[in-house]
Image (cartoon, rainbow, N blue to C red):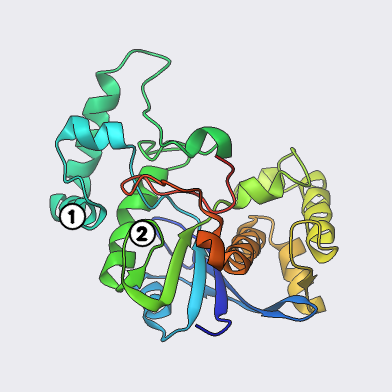
């Protein structure tokens, strides 16, 4: 497979004009990672069109690809990834939410959420979480579309070898540069302090402090800085994670050996 187009996807479970799915496109070159553009998908049809584009490409997608194995076993759901995804798609959203609610409410306070093996080291939310942020709904909407599009998900599912999807988590990379908040969807919280944190992250990416040097055209640099929601910057962070994974393609894209084929793994997350 030749060097592919790279994608970084900042995902939402309810895309709209106000809050679209944001897709960053880039290419690895001798001098680093060239950011080629950023596009918005305001509905499912436009996102599905991105997934259907012919390869070769590799994308980093910011949503959980799997569920905690303990949750799947407790619910008696299928033990293979494709079977599990087909099952939750057939269940529908209300029944999916009700099943997660029932498990959570049956557990003691303080440990109501089951986690995947990668959630601890990545400091990511459990895919059981349905609000603030609704990562469970992101899984519900995202994973079936990856399967339906026929993509290959290393460690989880064999599909089109020219179109590869890996689970990304922009916060994991952003923490290399700041522990402070750099984004908000609430206008009142879109402060100069958060803007300064975005500027710090962008400077680090352009200096190559997180892998390939980010070659950032001035107009796109302004977009990353001015987008106070952080969606554009998160898409680029996911793009960097995809680029790092491609450079480690001969080592299983950097995924640890023995990844649970129900849970998946966040690319770049240490075991």
Residue wearing tag 2: 142
Relative side of 76 to 2, left or right? left
| Helix, strand or loop for disc 1 | helix
| Residue 270 in the figure: left or right of residue 78 | right
> In this view of the protein, which residue sits in the foreground, 137 or 271?
271
Q: Looking at the image, can residue 19 be seen?
A: no
Q: Which mark is residue 174?
A: none
Image coordinates of residue 93 in percent, x first then y, are: 22, 49
Q: Residue at x 85, y 63 (%)?
A: 207
What SS does tag 2 mark? Answer: helix
Foreground pick, 127 / 229? 127
User: In the rendered image, which residue does mark 1 sit on?
Assistant: 83
Q: At 43% across and 15% down in the image, what residue appears?
A: 110
- Residues packed near mark 2 inside 10 Å, few (<14), some (14 to 19) or many (20 plus): many
For image coordinates 28% across by 61% down, the residue present is: 144
Disc 2 versus disc 1: distance between alpha carbons?
15 Å
Residue drawn at x 17%, y 51% as measured from the top left: 92
């Amino acid at each position: 497979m030749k060097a592919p187009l790279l994608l970084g996807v900042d995902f939402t479970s309810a895309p709209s004009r106000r809050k679209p799915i944001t897709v960053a496109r880039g290419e690895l070159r001798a001098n680093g990672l060239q950011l080629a553009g950023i596009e918005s998908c305001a509905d499912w049809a436009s996102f599905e069109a991105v997934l259907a584009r012919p390869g070769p490409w590799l994308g980093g997608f910011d949503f959980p690809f799997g569920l905690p194995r303990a949750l799947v076993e407790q619910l008696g759901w299928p033990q293979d990834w494709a079977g599990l995804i087909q099952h939750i798609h057939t269940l529908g959203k209300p029944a999916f939410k009700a099943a997660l609610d029932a498990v959570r409410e049956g557990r003691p306070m303080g440990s109501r959420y089951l986690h995947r093996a990668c959630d601890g080291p990545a400091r990511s939310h459990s895919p059981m979480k349905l609000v603030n942020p609704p990562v469970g709904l992101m899984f519900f909407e995202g994973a079936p579309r990856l399967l339906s599009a026929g993509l290959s998900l290393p460690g989880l599912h064999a599909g089109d070898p020219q179109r590869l999807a890996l689970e990304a988590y922009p916060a994991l990379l952003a923490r290399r540069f700041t522990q402070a908040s750099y984004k908000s969807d609430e206008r009142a919280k879109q402060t100069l302090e958060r803007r300064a944190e975005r500027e710090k992250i962008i400077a680090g990416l352009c200096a190559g402090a997180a892998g390939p040097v980010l070659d950032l055209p001035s107009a796109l640099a302004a977009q990353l800085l001015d987008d106070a929601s952080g969606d554009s910057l998160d898409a680029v962070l996911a793009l960097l994670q995809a680029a790092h994974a491609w450079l480690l393609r001969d080592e299983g894209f950097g995924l640890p050996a023995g990844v649970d084929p129900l849970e998946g793994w966040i690319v770049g997350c240490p075991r």
